[in-house]
Amino acid sequence: MALKICKHALVVVLLILMISHAGFAGDPDIISDFVLPPNTTIVGANYFTYTRLQSLFEADPPEAFTVSKVTKVEFPALDGQSVSYAVLQFPSGAVNPPHTHPRGAELLFLVKGSLQVGFVDTANKLYTQTLQPGDMFVFPTGLIHYQICGHNPAIAISAFGSANAGTVSIPAAVFATGIDENILSKSFKTDIPTIEMLTA
């Protein structure tokens, strides 16, 4: 009887450990104020300053959807801080195609224009909203989402709950990675010529 209780207790402990570790898909906690680059012992204020977005204010509006990312790759001071940033510029009618951020939620703030945004939850329910300047919308971690611009250009700023939230573009991941056409045609219940057209 005692052996049976011990086995049940062990199973419960293992399940708790598995569940608790499943929630850590984001950035690890750090035990210092900030993370220094390798072989560096001292940094100044310039290390914590990112200036490469200044060019956005001097440039003409883009002709295609453009994302200017600021992750720990572009701005090493973000390493360990569980935050990153992106400026999204939409010409009229532009779309940011369905995609996910596997390691962080996205909080989008609309600065200019109008955007229709949406995401799909794990129960396949679609949530959509039309945003106006000053509106914010949150896209939960790992869920497929998109944005599409109306008739006038739009600018949005996105903050992420990770120094490197990652991006998985659904069209590129499905149609540009070499997944067998037979698998895709069966999955999408269509013929191979249609799949070939989508992968071209």
Image: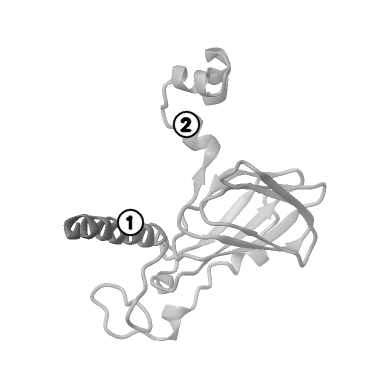
Earlier residue among tags 1 and 2: 1
Residue 107 placement: quadrant: bottom right
- Residue 79: image x %, image y %? 39, 70
Rate crowding at label 1 as few (under 14), some (14 to 19) or many (20 or more) other CA atoms within 10 Å. Answer: few
Residue 156 placement: quadrant: bottom right
Q: Is 173 rendered above or below residue 48?
A: above
Q: Residue at x 75, y 64 (%)?
A: 135
Secondary element at image label 2? loop
- Residue 33: image x %, image y %? 38, 84
Q: Is residue 165 left or right of residue 2?
A: right
- Residue 61: image x %, image y %? 70, 55
Furthest residue toward front: 1
Q: Nearer the viewer, residue 66 or 140?
A: 140
Amino acid type assigned to the residue bearing label 1 in the image? Leu
Q: Residue at x 56, y 45 (%)?
A: 122
Rate crowding at label 2 as few (under 14), some (14 to 19) or many (20 or more) other CA atoms within 10 Å. Answer: few
Q: Residue at x 31, y 61 (%)?
A: 17
Q: Which residue is mark 2?
A: 176
Q: Is residue 109 left or right of residue 77?
A: right
Q: Residue at x 56, y 58 (%)?
A: 68
Q: Nearer the viewer, residue 97 or 125?
A: 125
Secondary element at image label 1? helix
- Residue 169: image x %, image y %? 52, 42
Amino acid type assigned to the residue bearing label 2 in the image? Ala
Quadrant in the picture for the N terminus: bottom left
